[in-house]
Image (tube, rainbow, N blue to C red):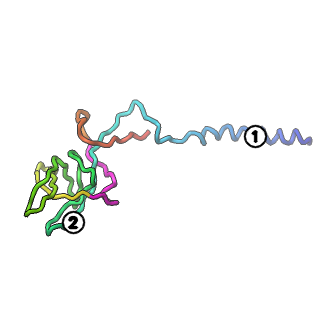
Amino acid sequence: MKRRNFFAALAVPLGAVLATQASVVFAYDNPRRRVRNRLRVRRRIRRHAFTRIRFSRPFWVVPIGLAVGWELTHDQRVVVVRETRMVEKDGVTSEVAVVQDAGGKTEQIEITREDTADNRKDLAGSVLDDADTTTPALEDEPRT
């Protein structure tokens, strides 16, 4: 067998295998690709909060960027932040978050803002109505 014929006999099947497998190699799911014709789901921003004692009182430690409309989870309980304001209690000025739970009960909770590894993580919040465009939210991209 001649050398040219030998390499041609090897190159043709090798080329056919590479050509058929190229579509598999290049057919990966690009996470930055925009998915069209699918509905996006807007969810509230939900973060974890924990308790710390300051000035002999319990304070919730919340993320620095806490905003009205966020959900906070604390001891198997989820509340929605309705308002934040400064109040003076026992001669000490502190920040208070007015929160509302699923039952509609409203209460004031003293908070301190601090970013920790635990409260930086985004959790799956409740789904918002399509008409609600003012509440801060995260958009879930639908999977294809």
Residue 2 found in image quarter: top right
Q: Amino acid at mark 1?
A: Pro
Residue 138, quarter of picture: top left
Mark 1 lies on residue: 13
Q: Furthest residue to the bottom?
A: 56
Rendered image: mark on residue 134: none
Q: Is residue 62 above or below residue 132?
A: below
Residue 8 percent across, percent down from the top left: 83, 38
Residue under the point 16% across and 53% down: 97
Indicate whether 113 appears above or below 43: below
Name the quarter where the N terminus is drawn: top right
Q: Main secondary structure of the magenta part?
A: loop
Q: Which residues are magenta?
A: 114-127
Q: Around disc 2, counting alpha carbons within 10 Å, would you say few (fewer than 14), some (14 to 19), or many (20 or more)?
A: few
Locate the C terminus and report the quarter of the image it occupies: top left
Residue wearing tag 2: 52
Disc 2 marks a residue whose amino acid type is Arg
Q: In what element is the residue under mark 2?
A: strand
Instruction: Identify the residue at horizontal 12%, vertical 48% (top origin).
Output: 104
